Image: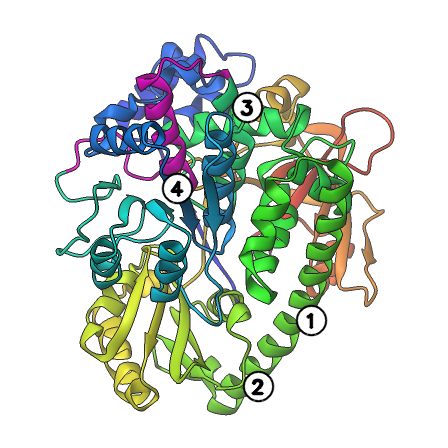
């Protein structure tokens, strides 16, 4: 599907800010432009952006109920109560549980962790888990990355004498569970300065509050920021404010002295000896942690992340790596089956604005990935459903700018359960309700989605020439890391580039183009790679000019020097 290239010029006021910043970054003008696009309007703000400081993290006690949560936790330790640390089975949940459990273990031994099984218990708090906690004498459960909708379950736990501290970041309903404390920056009326923490980030804030209340130095907790960085990257929360600070320092930890479990994953997936980036977390580390909960049990991921022996961690990492290989095979097969169904429906030419697809035999742990694939392919909000324990259980993904949570919320009378974010929602409903859900979901999407949201858009940060791709600019550009929503990797456009004469088709099926490019502003040849764009090769090889939009990547395969490679997002003949 051809994308729309969207280039938004700076406003008059923004141009003034750009001019002011140019006094500091005159040697590489595109830097000022990129900073202003990120809301940075002064040299002081720019220096803070380029040097994220842990001192700029917000006071955890600004979060409503933090004082209650810390007080109850301190009381539990003083009374030697048994504590359970409970979390979701995905990356965010398992890293959160590992962080809180490991940190508390430094001061207190009467603590255990629990991850519900995706297939027997499902998402969130289960009655089975509460019965287990009661049988173990647990008096306090700290629940992470879920729990905000567990009204009946927490009521049941309370009847058994078990208190809950909820650390969640999902959108709450009007009615809240009767917990001792609810830490959630998305609560209505919350005055906490930042509302986009990951679930692990909320757990970190609780431990930060606990440390402050007990006069514990912050260095031990700061040493666990690698877990928070993994959660931030994998959960795709905005890379701004506190998230960017924690991710920045967490990546430094990941590259210097990571958690033993993460170190084992790094070795297993071939990242040892390389600088680990957010992309590596998203595409290599995160999927392996996730595979444990998708294919077997999320508890195995926590076992790995809290391991104290490296050889043990390495063995667990290899098991999880196999789960990831199995997950890839399932993902490929189910995606192909889903595409075959949609092809038979004529989805490509359909006037429908959404996709709902159901197959009772699909693997529940894979359907979220399949929903993402379908959204990318058809550029429509997609819901993928399968049958689990007598209910149609599903995952949904959305396109840029469309709130799928609101869309699914309008069908809540048909649902048994649902929860999530703007772009990803999990849900369950009775099988007989699928047709009506499909009708009403499509009706809402058709009425509320904008035409522009149904066309893929490439947002271009700046139009530049090859002459501007200087070593100083590239060096400064690296300081924009870590990237993520709200601070996306800059996308550039260069017009009228030409093949140097040495570009060639590569790949098993010659589906990619390895490019060597020049323009008329520089005598330097730039390397590029265009994945799955073999259809553009004839135009490129004809020595006619063309326009490219691209990101700038470090070329990790270059033997000599710190070279770059242009990762081409799209190619168009120059008009």
Q: Label 4's element?
A: strand
- Point out the tag, 3 or 4, that comes first from the N-terminus: 4
Q: Earlier in the sequence, mark 2 or mark 1?
A: 1
Within the magenta stretch, is there residue 218?
yes
Residue 223's disc is 3
Tell which circle, 2 or 4, labels the residue nearer the N-terminal end. 4
Q: Which residues are magenta?
A: 190-219
Which numbered mark, 2 or 1, is in the foreground of this view? 1
- Point out which mark residue 340 bears: 2
Q: CA distance from mark 2 to mark 4?
A: 52 Å
Q: Earlier in the sequence, mark 3 or mark 1?
A: 3
Q: Is residue 195 left or right of residue 294?
A: left
Which residue is disc 4 drawn over?
82
* Picture residue at 37% right of the left edge, 48% below the top: 138
Residue located at (64% from left, 42% from top): 280
* Residue positioned 60% across, 54% down in the render: 300
Contact check, label 2 and label 1, Cβ < 8 Å = no
Q: Nearer the viewer, residue 327 or 462?
A: 327
Q: Relative to the observer, which residue lies in front, 414 or 462?
A: 414
Q: Which residue is mark 1?
A: 329
């Amino acid at each position: 599907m051809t994308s729309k290239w969207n280039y938004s010029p700076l406003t008059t006021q923004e141009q003034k800010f750009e001019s002011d910043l140019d006094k500091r970054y005159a040697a590489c003008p595109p830097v000022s432009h990129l900073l202003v696009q990120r809301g940075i309007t002064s040299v002081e703000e720019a220096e803070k952006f380029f040097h994220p400081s842990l001192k700029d993290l917000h006071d955890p006690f600004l979060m409503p109920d933090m004082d209650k949560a810390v007080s109850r936790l301190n009381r539990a330790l003083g009374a030697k109560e048994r504590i359970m640390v409970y979390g979701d089975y995905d990356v965010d949940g398992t890293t959160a549980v590992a962080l809180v459990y490991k940190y508390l273990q430094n001061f207190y031994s009467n603590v255990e962790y629990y991850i519900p099984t995706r297939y027997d218990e499902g998402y969130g708090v289960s009655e089975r888990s509460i019965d287990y906690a009661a049988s173990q004498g647990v008096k306090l459960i700290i629940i992470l990355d879920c729990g905000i909708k567990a009204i009946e379950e927490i009521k049941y736990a309370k009847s058994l004498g078990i208190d809950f501290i909820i650390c969640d970041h999902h959108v709450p309903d009007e009615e809240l569970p009767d917990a001792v404390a609810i830490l959630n920056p998305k609560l209505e009326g919350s005055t906490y300065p930042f509302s986009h923490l990951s679930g692990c980030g909320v757990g970190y804030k609780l431990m930060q509050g606990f440390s402050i209340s007990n006069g514990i130095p912050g260095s031990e907790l700061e040493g666990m920021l690698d877990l928070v960085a993994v959660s931030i990257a994998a959960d795709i929360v905005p890379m701004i404010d506190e998230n960017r600070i924690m991710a920045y320092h967490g990546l430094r930890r990941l590259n210097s002295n990571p958690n033993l479990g993460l170190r084992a994953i790094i070795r297993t997936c071939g990242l040892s000896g390389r600088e680990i980036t957010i992309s590596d977390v998203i595409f290599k580390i995160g999927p392996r942690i996730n595979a444990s909960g998708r294919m077997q049990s999320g508890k195995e991921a926590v076992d790995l992340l809290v391991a104290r022996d490296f050889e043990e961690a390495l063995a667990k990492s290899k098991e999880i790596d196999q789960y990831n290989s199995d997950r890839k095979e399932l993902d490929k097969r189910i995606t192909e089956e889903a595409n075959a169904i949609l092809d038979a429906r004529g989805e490509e030419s359909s006037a429908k604005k959404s996709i709902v697809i159901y197959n009772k035999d699909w693997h529940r742990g894979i359907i979220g990935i399949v929903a993402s694939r379908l959204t990318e392919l058809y550029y429509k909000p997609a819901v993928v459903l399968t049958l689990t324990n007598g209910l149609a259980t599903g995952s949904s993904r959305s396109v840029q700018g469309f709130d799928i949570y609101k869309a699914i919320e309008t069908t809540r009378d048909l649902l048994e359960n649902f929860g999530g974010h703007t772009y990803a929602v999990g849900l369950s409903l009775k099988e007989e309700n699928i047709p009506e859900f499909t009708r009403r979901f499509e009706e809402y999407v058709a009425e509320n989605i904008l035409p522009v949201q149904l066309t893929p858009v490439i947002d271009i940060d700046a139009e530049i020439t090859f002459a501007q791709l200087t070593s100083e600019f590239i060096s400064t550009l690296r300081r924009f890391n870590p990237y993520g929503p709200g601070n996306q990797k800059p996308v550039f456009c260069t017009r009228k580039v030409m093949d140097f004469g040495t570009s060639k088709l590569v790949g098993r099926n010659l589906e990619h183009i390895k490019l060597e490019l020049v323009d008329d502003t520089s005598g330097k040849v730039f390397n590029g790679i265009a994945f799955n764009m073999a259809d553009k090769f004839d135009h490129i090889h004809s020595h006619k000019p063309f326009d490219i939009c691209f990101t700038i990547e470090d070329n990790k395969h270059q033997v000599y020097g710190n070279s770059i490679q242009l990762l081409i997002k799209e190619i168009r003949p120059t008009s």
